[in-house]
Amino acid sequence: MSVKTRRGDASYADALLAVRDLKVHFRVKREPSAWAAWREKALLRAVDGVSFDVGRGETVGLVGESGCGKSTLARAIVGLSPVTSGSIRWQGVETVNDGRRPGAAIQALRRGVQMIFQDPLASLDPRMTIGRIVAEPLRTRRSHMARAEVRARVATMLERVGMNAHYLERYPHEFSGGQCQRIGIARALIAEPRLVVCDEPVSALDVSVQAQVVNLLRDLQRELSLSMLFVAHDLAVVKSISHRVLVMYLGRVMEVGERQALYANPRHPYTRALLYAVPVANPAIERSRSRVLLQGDLPSPLDPPSGCVFRTRCPEAIDACAQRVPPLEVHEGQCRRVACIRAVSP
Amino acid sequence: MAITTSPSQRMRDGFADAPKTKSPLALAFSRFARNRAALASLAVLVVIGLACYAAPLLIGRDPAESDWSAIAFPPTLLGGHWLGTDELGRDLLVRILVGGRISLEIGLLGTLVAGVVGVTYGACAGYFGGRVDAVMMRIVDMMYAIPYMLIAILMMTLFGREFHLVVLTISAFSWLDMARVVRGQTLSLRTREFVDAARAIGVTPWSIVARHIVPNLVGIVVVYATVMVPGIVLTESVLSFLGLGVQEPMTSWGVLIQDGAQKLEAMPWLLLGPAAMLCITLYCVNFIGDGLRDAFDTKDY
Amino acid sequence: MDLLEVENLSVRFARRDAPAVDAVDDISFSLDAGRTLGIVGESGSGKSQTVLALIGLMAANAQVSGRASFEGRDLLTLSERALNQLRGNRIGMVFQDPMTSLNPFLTVEQQLVEPLRLHRKVSRREARARAIEALERVHLPDAARRICRYPHEFSGGMRQRVMIAMALVTEPRLLIADEPTTALDVTVQAQIVDLLRELNRECGTAMILITHDMGVAAGLCDEVMVMYAGRTVEHASALQLFAAPTHPYTVGLMNALPRLDDESGRPLAAIAGHPPLPGEAIEGCAFAKRCPHAGEPCMTTRPVLRRSADSEDAWRACHLPAAAAVGDLQ
């Protein structure tokens, strides 16, 4: 994979997708009882001010643990989750207007951005043949296309993702997880999008099948010059496919950087703890260290800590961390940005 | 079959030799076919249906025709009146079969109308949610509160007892249950990932309802429809019992039962015949409904 | 001394108008007291079914055969009553999903006290004290006060600790953990793995850990058994298995794992094809269709699990010599 130096900020005019200060907040009931409907509702800050860019032909990996908001962010970009505030520009055109997604803008975005989902079987309509499933984007976008041509394109696409074109008439329940995911990929790519948002596409698959699908995505990205936003919780998988990586925690970005540099030298304490916690398939190394750098549990997203949200678990936290939200600042050259006042300087 | 390291190589899977399996619908029906009670009931129902339409022609007797030589005869194998006659000499068997046509037609037509209205209404309410759903469901709640019989009597008195009007009156309230059930199912379908996938593609909400939601409702709709049929047939019978059902010269099981109930002491066979037919038919529909419910119930997908 | 000795365990599920599924096909292994065994495999390998058969939690249509002797008694022939006396008492079990394994209607105290009251003759106060002690042993903060809370008031990692405490409160000789870390975040996973390791060291509880995560197995287990399509393909000490796996499937699995320390940017080495479908008839070695070194005997004869030539405690089921597979390791 060629690695180009990229900037992560708004001045990079070529960015396909530019997200600025995106916020997705949900109003939820504090107590589960139904009669508390008129009680004060709490605010769940799923995504709390995220900014990043995705350039042409680049894969941006989005990692974080549960509750960090990465899935909500991915869904918000494609229009499946409501946006509270912020900006999402697709090819220079703003698609968010005061929290709403105007019809024309969102249609334009959906023409260029497609999504691959986590549960391969659940993302396919069980009552449709896979031919119809894969053809659906064509039928929706280019309804005037002749049926024969649609069929031909579907067959070509299926072959391209490694499925036999004879399977057009079969139903999703006849296929394994890996094959269903290939069908999902075929569906996402058939209308020739520029950017594919992958929401944990391999988490539900076995290791050996995972490798097949990751390789497939890499190959297709190269062939079709696709950009990808790859959301996952598995750091090793993200490393194998991304050019740049974003680390999220409780709705905020902790660190952004070029893949190799970030994994080799994480600057944010959370990134460091995350990388350190990943188990390595080597008993000699595993047994000899205690991998626990973080104690305790994730704070509730309904009540995030003031200032830096990570400070309650951070081994480097000081009093100043509670005072203000640390901005995502440029660190050691344009490629790396860290949101930490204690980030270790090189 | 090597372990792949080359980036340009594709993974091929070896499913070409796997036997082609059926669509979810076909699978459900093959499961249904294994349920003997359901299958037998289906057969009986088909026989009844055929009998109602074909048999009177074979017997060659008119239901309104009076056989003056055989007035008020109890059931007998001789003389050709197998189930007896009424006080006007009309053959009961033929009347039951011809009446069966009306009852079955009302049952099926009523279910069809109520089903279509209920599915559309419930799917829209469930999918669009929010205020639309709230308003639509309040309308349903209000309709539930209206005393059905009063409306039925009002409509029949004002507009007469023409066949299609009877169907309409019955369907007018039967769709409520279907709407509720469909709405519930839609609410759960709406959260499934394939609906998200369709939204992400940019499919319009109406297309999603038509293409994704409704086909996935088939299971529950079919099962509920079989529950509705007996209800509708019974409602028609009740209306007829009250004298508000179909008009002469048409007859239905309800009319016959009403007639028979009035003359129970003198000619008990006039009640037993149509009542038995009604019971058998409703039992069969019931078993079929159970069979369908079991057939669609498995979590294969 | 063998705490648990399993011989020729097989579990078969009969299906209506479909061939029977051999979920577990002739598995044999033994476990010494105080040792940890990891059973590694992908979905469909039969690893969960193996332990479910041991403790008698199979589905009704399962046909179990073989022998599984625990402390001298054959688990597979015990009556339900006798099994009940062992379960939760001498054999503890931790399941995968802490969200659904705990009863949402009972407090943590009630659930912890239940096995104690059932298997030990202790007063309620004594049971409560022991329950609090168990929670402290799994490092649940503020145990005395939180013991009367309900499961939904705890986070995922905490719930898993509660599950482990429940399993250990009766001081079992054997703890079976079925994918205990799969549903958890990686930082919480690290905590739980550390906890299990500590408990094994301090209390001497033998453990069987089922996982598909090789890294977790590396960190926790003394021995590792790799399963594929219901069969054992390799069984060796963890150090040996990870340093020099000798079965092509194990090698393929290790190669397919994306690694943090991989700087080359190469594509992942995937294993071609897919595992056998449930109920599919397998002739010869189950892995033969996907194996890069498959030869004539592999397609026709099932390889027997044999002791490795160079080591006492390693077994493999393969027709090829060990050297053939080791060479593929990246």
Image (cartoon, coloured by chain):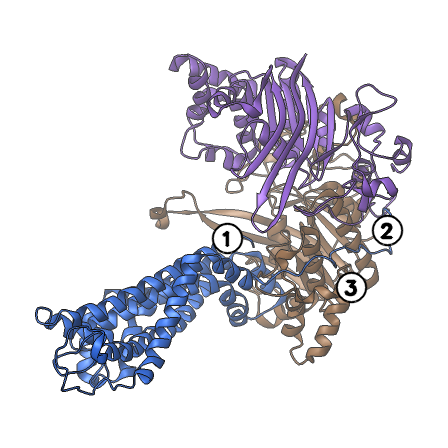
Q: Eyeballing the image, is C213 above or below A287?
A: below
* Callouts 3 and 1 on one subunit: no
Residue A212 vs residue B141: left or right? Answer: right
* Callouts 2 and 1 on one subunit: no
In the image, which disc is placed on residue A160?
none
Which percent across, then down, holds residue B86?
15, 78
Disc 1: CA contacts within 10 A as few (<14), some (14-19) or many (>=20): few
Q: Which chain carries label 1?
A: B
The answer to whether residue A6 shows anywhere in this view is yes
Question: Which residue does the numbered mark 2 point to in the structure image?
Answer: A3
Camera-side mark, 2 or 1? 1
Tag 3 near tag 1, CB within 8 Å: no
| Image hue for chain A | brown
Q: Eyeballing the image, is C187 above or below A146?
A: above
Report helix, strand or loop for mark 3.
helix
In the image, which disc is placed on residue B298?
1
**Mark toward the start of the polypeptide (2 vs 3):** 2
Question: Which residue does the numbered mark 3 point to in the structure image?
Answer: A159
Q: Which chain carries label 2?
A: A
Residue A101 vs residue A159: left or right? Answer: left
Which percent across, then down, holds residue A268?
72, 37
